[in-house]
Amino acid sequence: MKTKKSALGRGLSAILESPETDITSKDISGNYVVGAIANIPLEKIEANPFQPRDRFEEKSLMELSHSIGEQGIIQPVTVRKLGYEKYQLISGERRFKAAKMAGLKQIPCYIRVANDQQMLELALIENIHRQDLNAIEIGISYQRLIEECKLTQEKLSERLGKDRSTITNYIRLLKLPPEVQIALREERISMGHARTLITIENPQVQNRLLELIISKNLSVRDAEQLVKENGTKTSTAAKKQISLPEKHIFVRDKLRGELDTRVDIKRNTKGSGSIVITFNSDTEFDRIMSALEK
């Protein structure tokens, strides 16, 4: 009698058992897991020689260093294993530099085997289906699949069998201030609370409302009302903004679809204005620039 093949074909088990995939990261059960997080000493990580960004704004770096010193690192950097206890940074150099400035001795890292795209994709997809992931971890996994596996949100939704809106909602959580992300990760607030706070643009206001939600143990409905009350001035100001002509709205929506990111167009009564394209990382910036050059 023939045994039924795994739905994933070769599967993660075969990949993990292969001597070609030497991964040292472990999950909480002690098992070796591709794509898990490991704390690696900074001295064992070397910078990426192909890093396109060679200058970092000093003030911004100092602010991030202070935040890391107070809050720790929320989103791990990504490294690849070069040899025995030797790693090279793939992404997250700004966090890497700020961690050094903050005096950290080690940093949480995703470990990749160089040039094995299929293994990374399988590992991340399997990781997403774990039951113990919080909303921030799921959002990070979605973002990594999009950036590192070169997938659009549409393609990712097809592969995972999830609505695109679901994927978008999780990724949007990564735009929240560190304090809100930590509260969500530690389950002091729910995803419903976090999604409500996303509608507030000012990080200081978001943090102030977060404290009220936690201290008063507000329900999601109460939080929505709180946000609505605090967003009245913003809404009033938004009503005073000049409506965009139809052709500008068409171009804005077309760019959003083609670039798979947020695009805004601002215009004054004289017809001059600006186009603002949002990106969340250097990798996404490079992807958007490649799309614009086509």
Image (tube, rainbow, N blue to C red):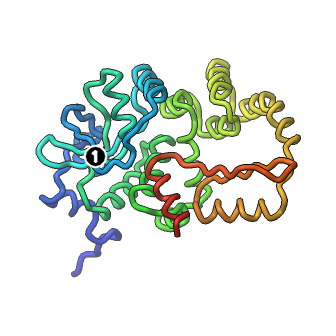
Q: In the image, is 36 to the left or to the right of 129?
A: left
Instruction: Mark 1: give few (<14), some (14-19) or many (20+) Cα within 10 Å.
Output: some
- Nearest to the observer: residue 113 or residue 17: 113
Tell me the amino acid under the disc marked 1: Asn
Q: Is residue 142 visible?
A: no
Q: Position of residue 240 (x, y in %)?
A: 88, 40
Q: Position of residue 264 (x, y in %)?
A: 70, 51
Task: Name the spot of residue 247 as percent of width and height, x first.
Answer: 80, 64
Q: Quadrant of residue 66?
A: top left
Residue 116, position in %: x, y?
Answer: 26, 62
Residue at left offset 26%, top offset 69%: 10
The residue closer to the viewer here, 128 or 77, is 77
**Visible in this render: residue 259?**
yes
Up-down relation of residue 129 to residue 56 (above or below): below
Image quarter of the N terminus: bottom left
Q: Is residue 199 above or below residue 159?
A: above
Of residue 64 and residue 265, the one placed in the foreground of this image is 265
Please state which of residues 230 and 61 is positioned toward the viewer in this rendering.
Answer: 61
- Whether 209 is drawn above or below 45: the answer is above
Q: Tell me the residue that label 1 is attached to.
A: 48
Left or right of 210? Residue 236 is right
